[in-house]
Image: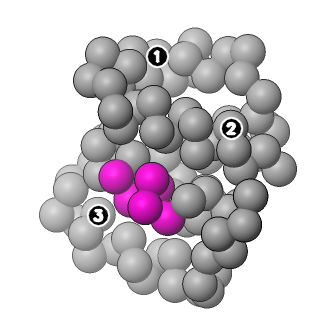
């Protein structure tokens, strides 16, 4: 797994509004050429935060990233986020 690469993508999207716009407009193209596994790439494309959490994405970056790029109802996201990541336990912060 390339936790660093996943975290790097999320950080770039969070910190730069232009990057976030490009990510939202064409996520697959944005991720081209990045050193990601197929599972990581699919999870980023689908904004599958539970899978990203399970794979070891940094939880603070993941939360900000998810809230920024979430395509659905953000009120529903707030209610579901914790419930969906809880089964994976407390994160390992090692890199």
Please name the residue that numbered disc 1 is placed on.
Answer: 26
Q: Residue at x 83, y 50 (%)?
A: 1
Q: SS class of the residue under badge 2? A: helix
Instruction: Give the distance between the C-alpha atoms of the residues marked 3 and 2, in whole angstroms.
Output: 24 Å
Considering only vertical position in the picture, is 35 above or below 32? below
Which of marks 2 and 1 precedes in the sequence? 2
Which of marks 2 and 3 precedes in the sequence? 2
Q: Which residues are magenta?
A: 59-64
Which of marks 3 and 1 precedes in the sequence? 1
Please name the residue that numbered disc 3 is placed on.
Answer: 77
Colouring: one colour
Asked whether, in this view, residue 2 is left or right of residue 75, the answer is: right
Q: Is residue 60 visible?
A: yes
Q: SS class of the residue under badge 1? A: loop
Please name the residue that numbered disc 2 is placed on.
Answer: 5
Q: Local crowd at mark 2 within 10 Å, few (<14), some, or many (≥20)?
A: some
Decide whether the magenta segment is chiefly helix, strand or loop: helix
Disc 1 to disc 3: CB gap under 8 Å: no
Q: Position of residue 39 (x, y in %)?
A: 75, 46
């Amino acid at each position: 797994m390339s936790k660093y690469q996943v975290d790097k993508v999320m950080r770039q999207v969070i910190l730069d509004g232009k990057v976030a716009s490009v990510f939202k407009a064409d996520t697959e193209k944005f991720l081209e050429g990045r050193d990601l596994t197929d599972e990581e790439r699919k999870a980023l494309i689908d904004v599958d935060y539970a899978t990203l959490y399970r794979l070891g994405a940094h939880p603070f970056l993941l939360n900000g990233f998810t809230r920024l790029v979430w395509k659905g109802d953000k009120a529903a996201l707030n209610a579901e986020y914790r419930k969906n990541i809880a089964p994976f336990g407390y994160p390992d912060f090692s890199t």
